[in-house]
Structures are given as C-alpha cells and as structure tokens.
Image (tube, rainbow, N blue to C red):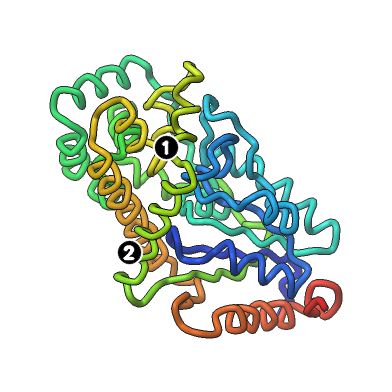
Amino acid sequence: MPVDQRPLAIFLMGPTASGKTALACDLSERFALDLVSVDSALVYRGMDIGTAKPDAATLARYPHALVDIRDPAQPYSAADFRADALPVMRRIGAQGRVPLLVGGTGLYFRALQQGLSDLPEADPAIRERLAEQAQQLGWPAMHARLAQLDPAAARRIGCNDAQRLQRALEVIELTGQPLSELQRGGSSGHFPWRVLKLALLPADRGVLHERIAQRFDSMLAAGFLDEVRALRVRGDLHPELPAIRAVGYRQAWEHLAGGSTPGEFRDRGIFATRQLAKRQITWLRSDVGARLFDPDRPGLPTRAADAVQLFLDESGRHGHAATPLA
C-alpha cells in the first residue's frame, strides 16, 4: 500500500468562544506548529475588541499568520483567504514545521480544502434591485425566497445575512442554477496536504451561551463601543462592508446610530453571537472527518495533544515536528 507522502496540516475548528485560541497556543508550545488564523474578522486592522482578537502579548509569543492584513474598508473573501493561506502553508512546511490553521470560519476551511467553484461575477444592477427589494420586504422575506429556490443554501445562510443572501439570489438569477449545486463543483482537485481535523464541539450548549454572554460583557467593559466609534468617525466605512457586518459590529453600529437602547444592543449582540455559534456547530457536525472534543471536559489540552502526536507519528514525522518541544 503506497505511503501518503503529502506534507501535514492540522485544522483546529470550533464555534465562537469555545477556546480555540488557547488550545492552539498550547499545542504550539508542545509541537513544532505555526499558527494560521482562519477567521473572517481577524483579518481586519483596528477591529480588536469585538473580534476577540488575541492581544499583542499573545500574538508576540504565538504569532498568527493572516491577522491584521486588511483595512476594514477593504472587502476580504474566501477566495482571498485561499490565495493567502496556500503560500503561507507552503512556507511553513518548507521550514520543517506543520501549519496549524485555527478559526471558526467554515467557508474559509472549505474553500481552502475543496477549492472554489466557477461562479459568475457580481452584477451591479441585479444587486441593486435585490437590495431595494430587501429594503421593502426585509431580509427574512428574501431568505424565505431563497429557501424556495435553493433550500440547501438557505439552511446554512442566516435570515439576516444580507451579503450572502444577496449573493445566493444573484447567482440564481445569473445562472438559473442553485448556488449550492454550483459550489459542489469545486475546482481544487487533490488537496496537497494530509490533514488532521480537530473540532471543539460543546456538549452543553447552555454553557457555551453563558460563555458568549460573559465574553460580550467583557468586550463592553474593555471599550468595544469606543472601538466602533473610532471606526465610525473615519467616514469611509458603512454598514454594507463585510467588516462592519461582522457579528457584534453590525449591532454596535446600529446602536450608535440611535437604532437601539444600550440594553437592546447588548441583547441583540449576544443573540447574534449565539446564532453564529449555532451555524458553526451545524457546519462542524457535517464534517465527518473531524475528531470531536468537548472543550468543557477536563484535560482538553492533553487529549488534543495525544491526537496530534498520533497523527505525526503515523505520518512518520519522528523528527522535528513529531517530538513534543521542551
């Protein structure tokens, strides 16, 4: 039987507030792993508190590639991520180390491993018409329309996720085919890394919800609203940008525009974060190749490290990357 000679990579996935960053840092202490962020919000500079970005001291000790690489005025896509991540992974491998990709943006993981389908370019006229319809009917009504036309896409897109709803409906108009069918025809071919997938999946959703609420309150105490105020006064940012649509930022932007009371803002921010976690968990459960770990069970670092050690040993990496570091 031929031996798989592909270089190694590790994916560490999980919903928001599940402890991914802490575990990734711990694993990089034990093994020769270099960290790569897989997060659609951490790419943006100046968005630190509301994204739960690792602080400067953590990033200095445990550098994460693909953090702080875009200004919030610049959109960033799954295609951009794949184009950035592949050379980073190759560079890490060339140095005799193993890339550990950590984050919760499932679309980025999927684009990286499966490639991107050949989708049509955006059509400004169609987008403008869909936006006008959404303004009249509301995005939940547009979501209901998508559910009729492309149920698979509707299941994974939130009813208020304006950007993705607009794109899914636009693709249907341009091609006459559901977005979910087109995406199944990815263009990557053979993924050139052998991957170990680790997924943090809380057994008790209530504990995760409590942690989300506590973290949101900690963000508020740390000056989250001041961070968003600084973004607003720039004058070149608006709510339709992907950066400002990020969970928490969208609710904060609306609040500072007078759209909610402080209490309503807090409730909406926590609810949106819980909904994000729910979508992330649904995506993780669909990935049959992932090793699942309950982050609330004692001994998580040891259990995860055992899985990494076994993966490295089975791959014949008995040298630099397979041996725990002192």
Left or right, residue 317 beside residue 150: right
The x and y percentages for residue 279 are 34, 56
- Taking the spot 42% from the left edge, 37% from the top edge, the residue there is 225
The quadrant the C terminus occupies is bottom right
Toward which corner of the image does residue 313 lie, by quadrant?
bottom right
What residue sits right under mark 1 in the picture?
225
Circle 2 packing at 10 Å, graded few (<14), some (14-19), many (20+), is some
Q: CA distance from mark 2 to mark 1?
A: 21 Å
Q: Which is nearer the eye, 145 or 248? A: 248
Left or right, residue 188 beside residue 203: right
Kind of element beneath mark 2: helix
- Taking the spot 66% from the left edge, 54% from the top edge, the residue there is 36
Q: Which is nearer the eye, 236 or 151? A: 236
Toward which corner of the image does residue 43 lie, by quadrant?
top right
Viewer-side label of 2, 1 = 1
The amino acid on which the numbered mark 2 sits, given as a three-letter code, is His
The quadrant the N terminus occupies is bottom right
The x and y percentages for residue 81 are 59, 42
Is 7 located above or below residue 183 in the figure?
A: below
Q: Does the image show residue 171?
A: no
The x and y percentages for residue 85 are 66, 47
Left or right, residue 229 beside residue 101: left
The amino acid on which the numbered mark 1 sits, given as a three-letter code, is Leu
Q: Does the image show residue 229?
A: yes
Is 142 located above or below residue 192 in the figure?
A: above
What residue sits right under mark 2 in the picture?
209
- Taking the spot 48% from the left edge, 36% from the top edge, the residue there is 118
Residue 121 image label: none
- Taking the spot 51% from the left edge, 76% from the top edge, the residue there is 291
Kind of element beneath mark 1: helix
